Image (cartoon, grey):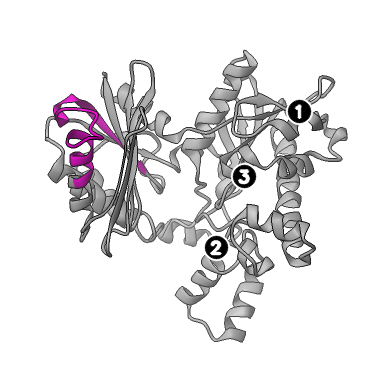
Amino acid sequence: MKILVINAGSSSLKYQLIDMDDESVIAKGNCERIGMDGHITHKTFDGRQVSEDCDFPTHTEAFERVVKALTEGDASVIKTMDEIAAVGHRIVQGAEIFDKATIVTDEVIDQIDGLAELAPVHNHPHALALRACKKVIPDYVPQVVVFDTAFHQTMPEKAYMFGMPYECYEKFHVRKYGFHGTSHRYVSRALAKAMGKNVEDLKIVSCHLGNGSSITAVDGGKSVDTSMGFTPLDGVIMGTRSGCVDPSAVTFVQKKLGLGASEMSEYLNKKSGFLGISGVSSDNRDIDAAAKEGNKRAKLAGEMLRYGIKKYIGAYAAVMNGLDAVLFTGGIGENAADVRSCACRDMDYLGIKLDEELNAKVQGELAKISAPDSKVEVWVVPTNEELLIARDTKELCGL
């Protein structure tokens, strides 16, 4: 049984075709620069590749090219789309409407589009992609949407509410939603399996660290708090996002620079974080390289991330009244040994002690990196959001 997983952005369309019999990836690719000049990259499980410029005026043309890449040419992997049992889509914002995976209907697409104000960069493009997919994929093939925010719908009211007038929540739905939920759900369960325990019996701090980063307290398999908030801007410092900032500092700088609301939002989302602090790059690898060469601002940016992670680990251990494990995932979490080391340093009081030699060797693989006498286990757990979406799709469709 084969399931196609789609992750659509405003100008991109990533995809994976997964064989659910053994959960292996048959092919994957990305349609980029939709609405501009267009380009597709397509790779198969046995190394065949396609990379070419294409005309992608809309997501519809991109989907059509995906179908062609999968079914035609030297890098095809299926004969027809009839071989696909279902399609699963990643959706960023489901708000309080969607707390679980849902079968795609025209009404569901309209509801996703209606949440665009809460996630303007993501939800409207998601809706466009869903409508485009319905034009290309046969009607008899079920489609499912899986929401990043759904995992965090278990947060208690005291965790997701802001200290603003209650009418902001009632009228405008302003609250903490949290993001990366699909990743946090996948890795927390993968960790429990690796530990030989039930996730319902564990208290976990899950650190998803990449260009966008979020940290989640997972108590008994449920999210009870998370670092990202109303939008993915909150929490620790990120590639180009500021992370947590005093709101008065925002209005102060906005006035000083003479920026409008949308301009200030771009300033915080696109010009801040590693890039804004270091002046070098938004990429953690570039930051580390510059820091090693003596760039003080790059060093500061790295220290701010490590310090922020440490604060959340301590805070979430307090929230859960205990801690069994800390896990690192995402591009930085899986590959940056120094980030993991610094975030866990001087945490002996909490029972966290790394095996530094082992930690330095681990990169992009499932591995325990805590010392044998560490009371809290520390792990690297590679994430696989696409596989979780495929699993949800299979389960919901009864396949």
Q: Residue furthest top?
A: 196
| Mark 1: few/some/many CA within 10 Å (<14, 14-19, 20+) | some
| Mark 2: few/some/many CA within 10 Å (<14, 14-19, 20+) | few
Q: Amino acid at mark 2?
A: Pro
Mark 2 and mark 1: Cα distance apart in space:
49 Å
Q: Secondary structure at mark 3?
A: helix
Q: What residue is pinned by disc 2?
A: 165
Query: Which of the two labelled residues, at mark 3 and mark 1, occupies the earlier sequence position?
Result: 3
Residue 46 position (above or below residue 208): above
Residue 375 position by quadrant: top right
- Disc number for residue 332: 3
Q: What residue is pinned by disc 1?
A: 358
Of marks 3 and 2, the one in the foreground: 3
Residue in the image at 71% along x and 46% along y = 309
Whether residue 82 is in magenta: the answer is yes
* Left or right position of 182 against 248: left
Residue 162 position (above or below residue 339): below
Q: Amino acid at mark 3?
A: Ile
Residue in the image at 20% along x and 44% along y = 133
**First to last magenta residue range:** 65-90
- Disc number for residue 253: none
Q: Secondary structure at mark 2?
A: loop
Residue 196 percent coordinates (x, y): 62, 13
